[in-house]
Structure formats: structure tokens, C-alpha cells
Image (cartoon, helix red, strand yellow):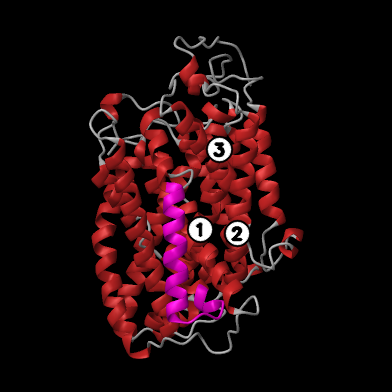
Amino acid sequence: MPIEQRGVDTIPEEERTSGPRDLISILLGSNLCLGVIVFGWLPPSFGLGLWPSVTAIVTGTLVGIAFTAPLALVSLRTATNLSTSSGAQFGVRGRLVGSVVGLLLSLGYTALTLWIGGDVMVGALSRLTGLPDTGVSRAVMYGVLAACTVVGAVFGYRLLLRMSKLLSLGMVVLLAVGFLAYAPDFTTAAPPETPYLLGSFWPTWLLAAVAAGLSGPVAFITLLGDYTRYISPRRHGSRKVFRATAFGLLIGLLIPQLFGTYTALAARAGLDYAGPLVETAPFWYLVPLLVAAAAGSVGNAGLMLYSMGLDLDAIVPRATRTTATLVAAAVATAFVFFGSFEWDVQSAMTSFVLLLTAIGTPWAVITLIGYVRCRGRYDADALQVFNRRSVGGIYWYRGGWNVAATASWAIGAGVGLLAVTTPFYEGPLLALTGGVDCSFVLSGLAGGLVYTALTARTTPASVAAEEPEPATAAAAV
């Protein structure tokens, strides 16, 4: 199989051969991994029992899907990734906001997947073979997983799609077997000595709904376009793609996360998940657990790393996608080493997802408002001006930036950061929300309302211009 040569350039019609079923496969197969399973552990680690954990995850996931799934339709129309597509609203240089948000999201989730997968693999090998569970053995395992991940990410979309199709079947079987393996120890009560993280039920439940449920779909706000750009709108309508996206996210996120909740309660996993998961597993399940940790981590981290390569390629147009992917892999692996030895998993995960949700939500809201306003009509060639190191086009705005959209995002992100609560930081707006983290809602509303107000009298460029201004070949960067 040849290495994919496409970066964030426009995918030609003849190469857009994927369909809604492929989209479901990639959203299911890539998410059946410990990097997603571990989010199901968060509610029990916050002090919630079975049903509060389940309702928090399901509620948050459904809300997140309703907000995130429409973004898949943007790249269906533009034939490029979502960060580049957002240039229609932010400007061909302003779309760097989306690239940076996407890079941070993918970086964090890649590191988390390698971190948890490596810890479980070392723990399982320790019980199976007596391998010392030390910092050195964990570092080696992180490196091995990262190297395997790079292979899939460098070869690109087609290989990752094939891997996802295999994983969607194999991982479902391994998780079903795991359900039986942990059944004797299962309990509906929260793990021992885990009081409500925020002191009372409802604030803790809402935190779980955002950190464990909502964060799953939001992680895809810049990723969905990586897959739908390979689907042709001439052969597949928007409704089919939207339904496939929503269904793929629903089963792809709920299956692993609810499995995480189930195993966390069975293993009495309070402040740590990987250790109790391995220790509680019956000996006969250690090999399947080892396979699930390895295969699932490579599949999920491969897609995240692939997206990181695209975003870095968009930020540095001179870099090839392969070079950008290798650089992104090195940075993600470094984050794994630092996080593993310096932070505890619960605090790191909670802080990461809440902060990135606050920053990413207003960008997604503005992009969706733009899609509705232009009715899905984009000038695909004008979106590529920055990548060609040119100037001009209908999305040039002021020096390549749409000040209104960029300022609206900055205001929304700022409000979100002021309203967030994490183990490391609490925003001052929490005093006005009764200590409840409303950063997702407030950041989205603030960004969306400001953008709507600033652009109320502006006609979307892609609708107003019948003949786009040609880009001129000039050194823009």
C-alpha cells in the first residue's frame, strides 16, 4: 500500500471513494481502545456509582453528538480538513486557530492513549512473565507503541481505515469477553474511599457529564473532516453522512466508555485505573487484555497522530505530511513520558479535557454558524491560498484574517477559561454559577453570540461572490 501523499490540499473527486459505512467503521474501530475506555472510569473516580455514572456519560455524549456531528458536513463540501475549511469564517490565515486547537486536542488524546495503553501492557506482562513494572519498562513500552502508531499515521487514511474495520470486529469480541471476565467482581457502588469530587452529587454529576461524556464527541470537532473529505457529496447526501457520523460516534464512544465504567466498578478503581484493571483481571484474560491494549492503542493513536500531522502541515505549509507526522509523534511521546512520571491520571485527564473543551467549543460554534449561513457552499480553491503561499481570494479578508471571527473565538475561549474548574485551576466565574462548571455552554454562547452580532450585516463571502477573486502568486509567508 503506497504512502498517502495528500496533506490538507483539496481531495480530487476521483479519490473521494469512501462512504457512510466507512465513516462508521473508522469511528467505531478507532475508539475501541483504552484511551477511550478510561473515560468511563472518571465518573466512578469522582465518587459516582453505576447509574449516576451511566446517566452522566450517556447524557453528555448525546449532547456532544448533537453539537459535533454537523461539523462532518463541512468537509463533505470542501474536500479538505476542518481546520482548513474554517478559513471560510476565520480567513485563510485565521484558520490557524482551528489548526492549533486541533493539534492540541490530538496531541493530548494521542499521549493519553499511549500512556494508558502502555501502563496496561506493562502490568499484564508483569503478571504473565514477571517483567519488572518499572519506569524503564514503561518508557520502553511507550516507545514501542509510539513507533507502531507512526507507521499507520504515515501510511495514511487508507491503511487506518482498514485497521479500523478489523478493530471494530476484534475489539468488540475482546470487550465482550472482558465483560464476562470482570462479572464476578462487579458492584454498583462507587469505589471505596472516593467521596464526591466536588463535595455534593449534582456538581459532581455535571462534571462527569462534561469530562467523561461531552468530551468524547468534542474531541472530534477538528477530526471529522479528516474522514468526510474522502466522501463524495455527489454519491452520498448530507443526511446519510450526518446519520452515519452520529451513529458512529454514539456506538464508538458509548461501548468503550460504559465498559470502562463497568470494569472500574468491578476493579474498585478509585485514584488509578490501569493498575486495578490488571490486578483484578483473571489470569486467563491477561492475554486478551494485552492484545486489546496494544491493538486498540495503535488504532486510536494512529488516527489522532494522522490528524496531528495534517494540522501541523497546515500550520507549516512547507513541511510534508510525513515530516509533520514524525514531528508530531516525537512531541506526543515526550508528553507521555512527562505526564506518566509527573502527573496522576485523573487530574491530568480532567484538566486536559475541560480546558480544551472550553477553547475548542467557540471555534466549532463559529464554524457551524458559517456553514449554515453559506448553506454549505464554499470556494474550495480559495481555501487553499495559504497552503500555496499566495494571497487573495474571497477568504482573504484583512491580511488573511477575519477579525470578527477571531475576536469572537478569543472572547468565547476567554469566558470558557474563566468558568472552568479543574484539579489545578478554578475560574473566577464559578462564583456566579454556584461552583458548577458551565464552561462548555458559556464559551459556546459567548463566541457564537459575539460572532453573530459582529457579522449580522455581512453577507457570507462564498454566497455573495459568483466569481471569486483569483489568488495571486506572492510570498505570503
Q: Secondary structure at mark 3?
A: helix
Q: Looking at the image, which is closer to me, 189 or 116?
A: 189
Q: Earlier in the sequence, mark 1 or mark 3?
A: 1
Asked if residue 84 is among those painted magenta in the image, a careful observer would answer no
Amino acid type, callout 1 = Ser
Residue bearing mark 1: 215
Q: Is residue 106 left or right of residue 434?
A: left
Q: Compared with residue 384, is residue 209 higher up or lower down, i.e. above or below?
A: below
Residue bearing mark 3: 366
Q: Compared with residue 87, is residue 166 higher up or lower down, i.e. above or below?
A: below
Q: Compared with residue 345, is residue 66 higher up or lower down, i.e. above or below?
A: above
Q: Earlier in the sequence, mark 2 or mark 3?
A: 2
Q: Which mark is residue 463?
A: none
Residue shown at 42% from the left, 31% from the top: 80
SS majority, magenta? helix
Q: Are marks 1 and 2 in contact (CB under 8 Å)?
A: yes
Q: Which residues are magenta?
A: 43-68
Residue bearing mark 2: 354
Amino acid type, callout 2 = Leu
Residue 398, position in %: x, y? 66, 20
Q: Quadrant of the N terminus?
A: top left
Marks 2 and 3, how far apart at CA: 19 Å
Q: Secondary structure at mark 1?
A: helix
Marks 1 and 2, how far apart at CA: 8 Å
Residue shown at 33% from the left, 43% from the top: 242
Residue shown at 40% from the left, 88% from the top: 187
Marks 1 and 3, how far apart at CA: 18 Å
Q: Quadrant of residue 125?
A: bottom left
Give the foreground label among 1 and 3.
3
